[in-house]
Image (spheres, helix red, strand yellow):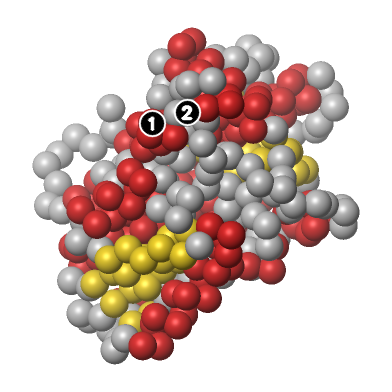
Amino acid sequence: MTTHREPLDSVLDAVGETPLVRVHAAPDEVPVYAKLESFNPGASVKDRIGAYMLERMLEEGTLPPGGTVVEPTAGNTGIGFAVAAGQLGVDAVFVVPERFSVEKQQLMRALGAEVINTPSDDGMGGAIDRAHELAEELDDAVVPQQFSNPLNAEAHYETTAPEVYDALDGEVGALVAGCGTGGTLMGMADYGLERDPETHVVAVQPEGSTYGDLFGEETEGDEYKTEGIGTHDVSTNRLFDPEAVDDLKTVPDRETHAEMGRIAAEEGQLVASSSAANSLAACEVAREIRDGAVDAPYDAVVTVFPDSSERYLSKGVYRSFEEWEG
């Protein structure tokens, strides 16, 4: 259950205050807790930035009343923006690479948004370019730019992180999160490091992603099935600050696929691939803290489960690894 106890006036009032639940695969000595973001009204962590960014942009005047938001997105951000746009009186157009979840695209359309597909081979970079082209063609249109807009990270600094720290009385030793835009981890890291500079911050990516480029590694990008985190072009990930990150965990798709099944069967949680990757990385960090390989100010690790597996069933997330479609 969420922590809301009183009737709410708007669906936007239901964004946030999601449960923080223990991951039982972690060592008892260093528990791992996951923020269950599927409890948001649009069923993902991106509801937070959808509501926060659009409200701030309307307040600041960067988005005119009745204007249009045009955003390149793999899907969940589009749903989050669409939920908020419908309630705030603005239109929404989303540019989505073809390979991403059909369910997400259907939901964006159901919420009143227009969805435009770009070739999968062009990646998110191609979607970003097309979004800016569309914004120039439309009147009163802006691109919120989740990959570079500081409001993305600010949303998590103002909402996600305080909820976590309140729930754990401030005793958070490590923050672990997958990075697509990097907004979730950066916002939480800024909040955590202000409270304790020794907080251990860990980024998570799928094998084939190239976030290692930002750490001086020689990476060779490859395709991966894990959806919603990772990058093939770090130049688009302007929010990510490698100086705030202590470690980068890279998780192979095959391990992520197995973890999705384990979490469902053993822990009763229907989470998608980014959550599974976060779970594996967070449990590894917990073991490192337990074994003394990592120093952390507290014996507790926090991660994020961004969304539900139900959004990816058509991709065979619970079938064999070979049948799982990226």
Identify residue type, mark 2: Val
Q: Identify which residue is drawn at 15% across, 53% down.
A: 10
Residue wearing tag 1? 313
> Label 1 near label 2: C-beta < 8 Å?
yes
Q: Quadrant of the C terminus?
A: top right
Graded by Cα atoms within 10 Å as few (under 14), some (14 to 19) or many (20 or more), the crowding at tag 2 reads many
Residue wearing tag 2? 317
Q: Identify which residue is drawn at 45% across, 82% down.
A: 133
Q: Nearer the viewer, residue 131 or 246?
A: 131
Q: Nearer the viewer, residue 94 or 33?
A: 94
Identify residue type, mark 1: Leu
x, y percent for residue 153: 53, 60
**Label 1: element kind:** helix
- Residue 48 visible in the current orientation: no
- Residue 318 visible in the current orientation: yes
**Label 2: element kind:** loop
Image vertical order of residue 272 relative to residue 198, above or below: above
x, y percent for residue 195: 62, 48
x, y percent for residue 304: 51, 37
x, y percent for residue 176: 63, 39
Q: Identify which residue is drawn at 32% across, 36% down.
A: 39
Q: Identify which residue is drawn at 33% across, 73% down.
A: 69
**278 horizontally vs 311: left or right:** right
Q: Quadrant of the N terminus?
A: top left
Question: Residue 80 appears in which quarter of the rendering?
Answer: bottom left
Image vertical order of residue 96 relative to residue 219, above or below: below
